[in-house]
């Protein structure tokens, strides 16, 4: 019964979405206040209905109602409760429902907290947002209904893919979807502004929080995914340039670009039409990502049950929204008169260059991702993997890292390059010292380590110089007190840029100095890996809740003292007839010790793989700092204070 | 049918995750082994979804890893080993496509797009800064008005 109610709620939500996307738009066009105002209750009703549908599906999973097909295919009575819940979005249908719920949620947030928006703009934004929800609700109901039942329910379920039964992966999709969908909000703002034909600093200020939120969610989602891949897949990689990873990385890069260009709109009223274009592209790439994952046109390790029919439907959504928005853009963008003027050496110019690097980098990733498809047109079956992306994409990030500290310190409007560079001399000297030190310490290895560490150190120390510069001159006490009174946006910028530097160091340190050892070892026989003594002490068979485990105990010693006792496992999930490897990791600030147990060998020994992974955690520390920076910036006073200012202003604008 | 093959391929690859290179495959000579790893990470497992043979657990990946090592032991250079395998399995196995034929577009896309974007950016910035230089001074009308104001 509850399942049917969920299905019904979803159909009602479709109807509400249809009304919400038409009525406020007409109201905004004709200037009918009551028609515009209905967008707010409609958005509330829409999230209530979609939320009810989602709750109904969750209920079916929690109670293991195997008469529901989706539950049968993705759950099992013996599965731990948390994975019963995460199983709701561990499949195509449920994850689409989560997707559309995020769309409605963002729409409702804009309705509830957008009190400072002019009525007309708000009505249009909510209508566009609702049209996105409408398209995906229709998609779910027509091609991917999660509420289908069996005529005669089976006794027990088929369980969730064991690789997905993991806390990292339980949280990864919701964050990613909030990020993807957060970009739908900026898209709606962009299209609404195009319909309105007017963009000003206030628009930049309204759009920025949504972009920031989307970017923060994407950062967390991507970081969680890569962290999961690191500890779960068993060879300790953190990024594979898989098409589906790229699908999340492209919107992230665009969101980062948008974040910066929206600042220029807000502060200087320039780059308006470019910002609009970025907003359209960022969401367009979110949709492309969805298409890549769901259609199966490109092979990827992220195996969602893919279906050509669904692919075509999403392609249609993609074409209508992105194509429509771009056409509107072509017709209206010229009306966006830029106001602020600036000299060629200025913060504005630096941000333009930032945008060029991020956008081109993202498009390189895009071309690489779809190239296997294009190759087929030329009758060539080609693969594009990590070596290509490392070679073709990394240079853009290197240049970005080089110019970032300088650009971040240049004053608005008109700057003197010499003055900024002079301030940064200590940071550059420090970074070169780091380069020299690292170069001297390592022997006969690649240049990757020293260069990556140099870039990271340059980013971190340059950002520190920037922060110190903001406190002005004078006595240390006065500067410290000024430091505590800096706007939150400055702190956000500080954390985000330092985080980027830390991630740079993490990636290059790991890639350059990782140590790996593969061997057959007998129980009780110690062996040496990069200064650590590792002993396999025992291997036992143990039952788990819904799996059987081969449970090993390994002692890691350094200088005669035990550093860690590690328990790598091999699990077999009988229902899915699938084994997984659970690596055991001793986490550390400077290095991780990562051990994997393999198969028993003929001579009575065990295959063991040991990695020493220096700096690996810096990758995620950096991501955490970046997200933190986004959150701190999001809490900046001006986004809250802007409310009152905008209101008085909106009243001053006559209804055209 | 296509779906079945796809899901089978995934099963093959994920069958025993995390233990691609087995100890019995490793060469005694660490220099040769290191070269084998480098080559392996540039070759694609043909039945998998975008994994290289160094990370894949599929049987065919194992065969290829052994083949790579065999050729290395016989004294082939890295390029010779790769050419040997490409000849047998086609360019599909290369994780990094060669810059030949249509693939040139792929390789040049980044630099060319960057140039276009950078030139467009510079033109835009110069136009903005020219109007900046202009707007710096007051127009004759404004100057006249300023004088009037100052007189008052």
Image (spheres, coloured by chain):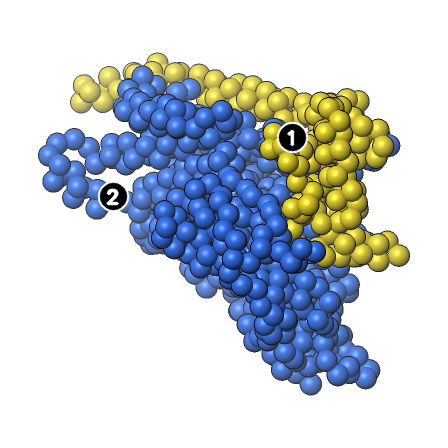
Chain colours: A blue, B yellow
Residue beneath the point at 74% across and 47% down = B49
Q: Position of residue B76 (x, y in %)?
A: 74, 24
Please indicate, yes or no, whether residue A567 appears anywhere in the rendered image. Answer: no
Separation of marks 1 and 2 at Cα, in angstroms: 57 Å
Q: Is residue A422 left or right of residue A271?
A: left
Q: Label for residue A486?
A: 2
Residue beneath the point at 81% across and 84% down = A152
In the rendered image, which quarter is residue A583 located in?
A: bottom right
Q: Position of residue A516 (x, y in %)?
A: 55, 42
Q: Position of residue B13 (x, y in %)?
A: 73, 52
In the rendered image, which quarter is residue A270 located in?
A: top left
Residue beneath the point at 55% across and 72% down = A82
Above/below status of A512 relative to A239: above
Decide which of A591, A162 is in the foreground and name it: A591
Residue beneath the point at 31% across and 26% down = A430
Please indicate, yes or no, whether residue A486 appears anywhere in the rendered image. Answer: yes
Q: Label for residue B32?
A: 1
In the rendered image, which quarter is residue A374 located in?
A: top right
Label 2 element class: loop
Above/below status of A87 relative to A124: below
Q: How many marks?
A: 2
Label 1 element class: helix
Chain ID for label 2?
A
């Amino acid at each position: 019964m509850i399942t049917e109610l969920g299905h019904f709620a979803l159909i009602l939500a479709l109807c509400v979405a249809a009304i919400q996307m038409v009525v406020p738009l007409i109201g905004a066009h004709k200037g009918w206040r009551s028609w515009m105002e209905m967008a707010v209750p409609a958005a509330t009703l829409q999230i209530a209905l979609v939320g009810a549908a989602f709750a109904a599906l969750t209920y079916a999973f929690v109670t293991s109602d195997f008469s529901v097909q989706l539950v049968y295919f993705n759950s099992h009575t013996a599965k731990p409760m948390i994975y019963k819940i995460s199983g709701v979005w561990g499949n195509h249908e449920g994850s689409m429902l989560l997707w559309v719920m995020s769309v409605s949620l963002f729409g409702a947030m804009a309705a509830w907290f957008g009190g400072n928006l002019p009525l007309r703009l708000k009505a249009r934004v909510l209508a566009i947002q609702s049209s996105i929800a409408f398209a995906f609700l229709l998609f779910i109901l027509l091609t991917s209904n999660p509420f289908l039942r069996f005529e005669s329910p089976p006794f027990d379920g088929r369980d969730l893919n064991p690789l997905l039964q993991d806390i990292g992966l339980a949280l990864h999709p919701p964050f990613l979807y909030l990020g993807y969908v957060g970009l739908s909000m900026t898209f709606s703002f962009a299209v609404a502004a195009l319909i309105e034909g007017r963009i000003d600093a206030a628009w930049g200020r309204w759009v920025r929080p949504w972009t920031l939120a989307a970017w923060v969610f994407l950062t967390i989602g991507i970081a969680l995914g890569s962290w999961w891949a690191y500890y779960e897949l068993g060879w300790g990689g953190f990024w594979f340039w898989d098409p589906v990873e790229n699908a999340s990385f492209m919107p992230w890069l665009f969101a980062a670009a948008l974040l910066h260009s929206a600042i220029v709109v807000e502060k200087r009223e320039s780059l308006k039409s470019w910002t609009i274009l970025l907003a359209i592209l960022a969401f367009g790439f979110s949709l492309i990502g969805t298409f890549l994952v769901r259609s199966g046109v490109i092979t990827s390790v992220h195996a969602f049950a893919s279906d050509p029919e669904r692919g075509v439907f999403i392609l249609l959504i993609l074409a209508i929204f992105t194509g429509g928005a771009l056409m509107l853009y072509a017709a209206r963008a010229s009306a966006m008169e830029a106001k602020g003027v600036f000299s060629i050496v200025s913060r504005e110019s630096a941000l333009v260059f930032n945008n060029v690097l991020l956008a081109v980098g993202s498009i390189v990733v895009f071309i690489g991702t779809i190239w296997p498809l294009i190759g087929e047109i030329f009758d060539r079956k080609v693969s594009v993997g990590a070596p290509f992306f490392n070679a073709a994409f990394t240079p853009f990030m290197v240049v970005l890292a080089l110019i970032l500290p300088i650009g971040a310190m240049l004053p608005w409007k008109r700057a003197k390059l010499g003055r900024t560079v002079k301030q940064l001399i200590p940071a550059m000297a420090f970074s070169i010292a780091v380069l020299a030190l690292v170069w001297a310490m390592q022997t006969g290895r690649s240049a990757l380590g020293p260069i990556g560490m140099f870039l990271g150190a340059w980013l971190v120390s340059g950002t520190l110089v920037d922060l110190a510069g903001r406190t002005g001159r004078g006595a240390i006490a006065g500067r410290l007190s000024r430091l505590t009174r800096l706007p939150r946006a400055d702190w956000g910028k500080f954390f985000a840029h330092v985080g980027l530097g830390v991630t740079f160091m993490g990636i290059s340190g790991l890639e350059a100095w990782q140590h790996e050892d593969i061997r057959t070892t007998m129980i009780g026989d110690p062996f040496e890996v990069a200064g650590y003594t590792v002993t396999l002490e025992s291997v036992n068979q143990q039952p788990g809740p819904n799996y059987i485990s081969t449970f090993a105990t390994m002692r890691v010693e350094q200088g005669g003292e035990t550093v860690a006792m590690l328990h790598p496992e091999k699990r077999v999930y009988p229902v899915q007839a699938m084994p997984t490897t659970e690596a055991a990791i001793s986490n550390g600030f400077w290095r991780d010790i990562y051990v994997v147990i393999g198969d028993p060998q003929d001579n009575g020994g065990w295959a063991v793989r040991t990695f020493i992974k220096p700096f690996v955690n810096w990758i995620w520390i950096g991501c955490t700092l970046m997200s933190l920076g986004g959150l701190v910036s999001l809490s900046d006073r001006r986004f809250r204070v802007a409310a009152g200012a905008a209101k008085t202003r909106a009243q001053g604008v006559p209804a055209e | 049918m296509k779906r079945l093959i796809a899901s089978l391929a995934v099963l093959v690859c994920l069958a025993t995750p995390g233990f691609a290179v087995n100890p019995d495959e490793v060469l005694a000579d660490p220099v040769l082994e290191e070269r084998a790893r480098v080559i392996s990470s540039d070759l694609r497992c043909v039945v998998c979804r975008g994994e290289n043979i160094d990370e894949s657990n599929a049987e065919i990946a194992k065969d290829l890893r052994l083949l790579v090592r065999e050729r290395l032991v016989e004294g082939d250079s890295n390029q010779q080993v790769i050419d040997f395998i490409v000849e047998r399995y086609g360019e599909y196995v290369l994780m990094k496509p060669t810059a030949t034929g249509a693939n040139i577009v792929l390789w040049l896309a980044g630099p060319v797009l960057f140039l276009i974007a950078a030139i467009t950016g510079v033109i835009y910035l110069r136009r903005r800064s020219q109007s900046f230089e202009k707007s710096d001074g007051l127009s004759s009308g404004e100057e006249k008005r300023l004088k009037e104001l100052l007189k008052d």
